[in-house]
Amino acid sequence: MPDDSEDWAALRRELLALHGRLAEIAFKITALRNAPQALEARYWRDFYRALLLGATRSAMAKLLLVFIAGVAFAVPRAHAEDHLDLVVAIDLTQSVAAIGPDGKSDFGKNVEGVGKLLVQVPAGTELTVIGITDQSFSEPNILMRARVPDDPGYFEERLTGARSQILRAWNQKTAHLSPVFKQTDIFGALELAGQIFAQDKSMTRKELVVFSDMRESTPSLDFERMRLVPEYQAVGSRCGGSLELVGVDVVVAGADGEGKSTAYWESLHRFWVEYFEKAGAALQTFTVLRDSRHDF
């Protein structure tokens, strides 16, 4: 029987505490014995992890640099390969002053047509707008010159802004512009365009857009008074000096036949086809329309 003088419950609690302490000491002894191997294992684990992550980051950084450099060099090169030298000629003579059935003059339609063209110009365009007058070459009338930036912007925001500024300048320029010249010197305007193209040899594309009825009317040659326009070979000596438009794409808009027969318009068309072919240019379009979508 237990001695009533001892506190057996306290002794049991003390015994359990001693057993727990012994277990803790045994765990520490085992951990200390395994510490060197565990330390070595953690060291090599961290070493290989750091090596792998460092190599991955380095490779990604190099790849990113290569990508950025590629984009930086590729984009300017792409733009540099597609620079456009654009010359727009608009008729400022009285031959386009007549009011049509729609209540608008051919001149007003030409002004609107130029405006629609200006909001389509691509990035990297050198733009010049000239007037067709009675002395287009000897007294050149440069209405506007502008440069569209090569970089259109990530979302083409720079190109859109440039187009808006050009259109605003055009609207301001034409607010007080009217067709006042009595004669139409188209040959002089084309010769002026040829000299503008010759100023910059670095442009990869050259395009001439003419808004006119294309009826030459000067003392040396007057298409307005003719029943039919003669072939180029018959009047070539009266078409001004030698014209160089080699490699230039030509678009003629607004070449109407008001007051003339269909045969007259066809003879006018045939003359200008021969004329531009002789000058080394490519006549892409010859139309009475002015607001068609332009394919740059």
Image (spheres, rainbow, N blue to C red):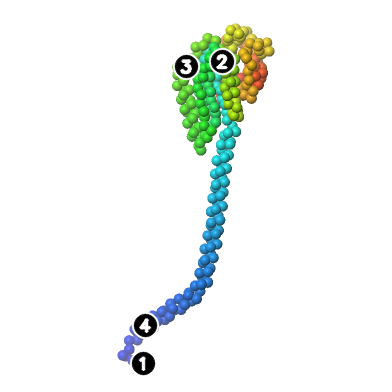
Q: In the displayed structure, would residue 218 be above or below residue 156?
A: above
Q: Looking at numbered disc 2 in the image, what kind of residue is underneath it?
A: Phe
Which of pointers 3 and 4 lies earlier in the amino acid sequence?
4
Residue corresponding to mark 3: 177
> Comparing marks 3 and 4, which lies closer to the viewer?
3
What is the distance, in whole Å, between disc 3 and disc 2 at their CAs? Answer: 19 Å
Q: In the displayed structure, would residue 235 be above or below residue 193?
A: above
Residue corresponding to mark 2: 137
Q: Looking at numbered disc 4 in the image, what kind of residue is underneath it?
A: Glu
Residue corresponding to mark 4: 14
Q: In the displayed structure, would residue 238 be above or below residue 169?
A: above
**Residue drawn 35% across and 91% down?**
2
**Residue drawn 55% across and 62% down?**
48
Which of pointers 2 and 1 lies earlier in the amino acid sequence?
1
Q: Which one is nearer the viewer's eye here, 184 or 211?
A: 184
Would you say the residues marked 3 and 4 are in contact, meaning their CB atoms lie under 8 Å apart?
Answer: no
Q: Looking at numbered disc 3 in the image, what kind of residue is underneath it?
A: Leu
Q: Which one is nearer the viewer's eye here, 231 or 44?
A: 44
- Quarter of the figure with residue 278: top right
What is the distance, in whole Å, between disc 4 and disc 1 at their CAs? Answer: 21 Å
Q: Looking at numbered disc 1 in the image, what kind of residue is underneath it?
A: Met
